[in-house]
Structures are given as structure tokens and as C-alpha cells.
Image (cartoon, rainbow, N blue to C red):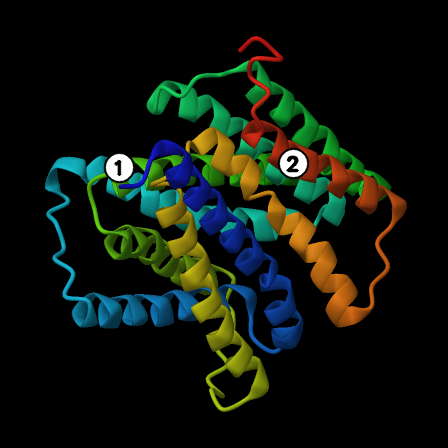
Amino acid sequence: MINNKDSEFKGIFILLLGGLLYSLYGVFSRVIGDNIAPFFQYWTRALIIILLLFVLIIINKVSLKSIKKNLPWVCLTGITSGLLVPLYFLAINKLPIGTTLFLFYATSTITSYILGYFLHHEKMTRVKMISLLLAIVGLFVVSMDTFRLQSTVYIVYAIISGALFGVNVNMVKKLGKEYPSFQVNLFNWTGVFVIGLISSYIFKESGNWNILSIPWAANIGLAVCSLCASLSVIIGFKYIEVQKGSIILLSELVFGVILGIALYAEIPTVFAIIGNILILGSLIIPNLNINKLLKD
């Protein structure tokens, strides 16, 4: 029998794996480059993932459950998952990278904390608040050298995309209690497919169907990586609070710096090093036994 501590440790490990998988997005994206239009690759990846999910559901003989009583939550899950990337894409193409990253991650983490309190009745302890503050300071320091507040509409897009991610992980947590992980993933990627396809049409993107090319191999690889990452988040949140889990997902930034050094010999800035140390601290603090010290 797994006790609460073992269960929480399992959740931490799975979400750290999710953070690592999310950090691989940049690696695959560099290979894809401009060879495949952004929203075209977005909805084609979603289609690949949906097909893979149905294969996994059949192989594992997973029984899909009726969504009738949870239809509003299911729709909200798909819509938030589908909308957050187009809005993030619009923001990051008009704002400095540091500004977009800070606004996205800070908003998503704060949203997760608030919804975790109201939706899942998670306690807002002093330790968690210290962790949140440390994470936000770390995010700001990481983005400090490129942080600029400009183009108000795109700042709003970045904030909304972060809030949508925070809402989405809370929906995943809620639905994960009643539905198989594969089915919850279907809710997410169906939304991504529909909204990605519509976005691709709106922006009049040209399709690249050269599936034997290296960029398409990377697109398929990113689809598999995305599937594993989203499954890690869905499964991980079964074992850990949303508030703690949202902080752990910030490990994506730390893994991103490590991958940059290992694969591209990128030298991180002083701001990046200090900021990531602060983020690491925010990951560790909630899982240390210091509640008595801080009189939680």
C-alpha cells in the first residue's frame, strides 16, 4: 500500500519527467524551424497524438466513460488546451522572449495556486506562499535581460495564455479523478486539433506534406514527446496538489538551460543562472519538512 509520502514522491518524479519532456520542445522546434508553418504543425501533431491515443486505448483495453455529466468541464479542458498555444505564439512573436516567458509562467503558476485553493480546497500555507514568491522572483530574474513591457495587446495575450494553462492543469486534475488518463488526454488534444486547424485556416498557412523530410520527422518526434509530456502531467497530478505541481513544472526552464549547455554549448547568462537557482529553491522548499519551523 502506498502512503501519502510515497504517493507525493511519485507525483513529484512524474511531473519532473514532464518538465524534462516539455524542455525538449525547443530541441525539436529548432529542427523543424520555418519548414512547417506553426499552426499547421500544431494541428497535425494533435492529429498524430489522437491517433496514437486511440491505439493505446485499444491495446490497453481502456473503457471510455460517458462525458455527459461533466460536459462543461470537458469542453473547458479542450478549449483552454487549444487556445493557449495560439495566444502564446502571437505574444512571443511580438514581445521579447523574456517578457513572454515571465508573463506566461508567472500567470499560470498564480492561476494554479488560486484555483487549487477554490476548486480543490488545497491549503494556502506559508511555505507554499514563500515557494510561489521565490518562483516568481526567479522567473523575473531569468527574463531580466530581455524584459520589456510594450505592445499592450500582446502582453494581454501572454497573460491570458498563462491563465489558460493554469485553468487547464486544474481541469486535468479534476477530470483525472473520474476518467482514465488516456481519455483526459483526448479531451486536451481534440481541443488542440480543432483550434489549431481553425487557426491555420485563419492565417492562410500553406501545408507541408513532405512527411519523409527531416522537419516532418522532428514534428512526429515532437508529437510523441508531447503525448508523453501531457500524460506525465495528467498522471502526476493524480498524486500531488495542483499548487505544488505547478511549481514543479517550472523545472522545464531549468532543464532547458541544461539542454542548451549539453546540446548547443550555450553559455547561460548570470541572470539565467541566478534565476534558475531561485526556481530550484522554489521546487525544493514545499517538499522539505520545515512546516514546524515556519509554524504552518
* Residue 106 in the image, given as x and y percentages of width and height: 62, 33
Nearest to N terminus: mark 1 or mark 2: 1
Q: Residues within 10 Å of mark 1 (few under 14, many from 20)?
A: some
Q: Quadrant of residue 38?
A: bottom right
Identify the amino acid type marked 1: Trp
* Residue 29 in the image, given as x and y percentages of width and height: 61, 68
List the single residue furthest toward the right. Answer: 270
* Residue 231 in the image, given as x and y percentages of width and height: 38, 55
Query: For mark 2, what is the residue?
Result: 103
Q: Quadrant of residue 262?
A: bottom right
Q: Tell me if 230 is positioned left or right of 2 in this view.
A: right
- The correct choice, above or below, for 144 with respect to 190 in the image is above
- The correct choice, above or below, for 64 with respect to 236 in the image is below
- The correct choice, above or below, for 33 with respect to 65 in the image is below
* Residue 260 in the image, given as x and y percentages of width and height: 75, 63
Q: Tell me if 61 is positioned left or right of 246 in this view.
A: left
Q: Quadrant of residue 2?
A: top left
- The correct choice, above or below, for 261 with respect to 211 in the image is above
Residue at figure coordinates x 64%, y 68% from the top left:
27
Give the quadrant of the N terminus.
Answer: top left
Query: For mark 1, what is the residue?
Result: 73
Regarding residue 112, the answer to whether it shows in the image is yes
In this orientation, which residue lies closer to the viewer: 87 or 66?
Answer: 66
Residue at figure coordinates x 22%, y 51% from the top left:
180
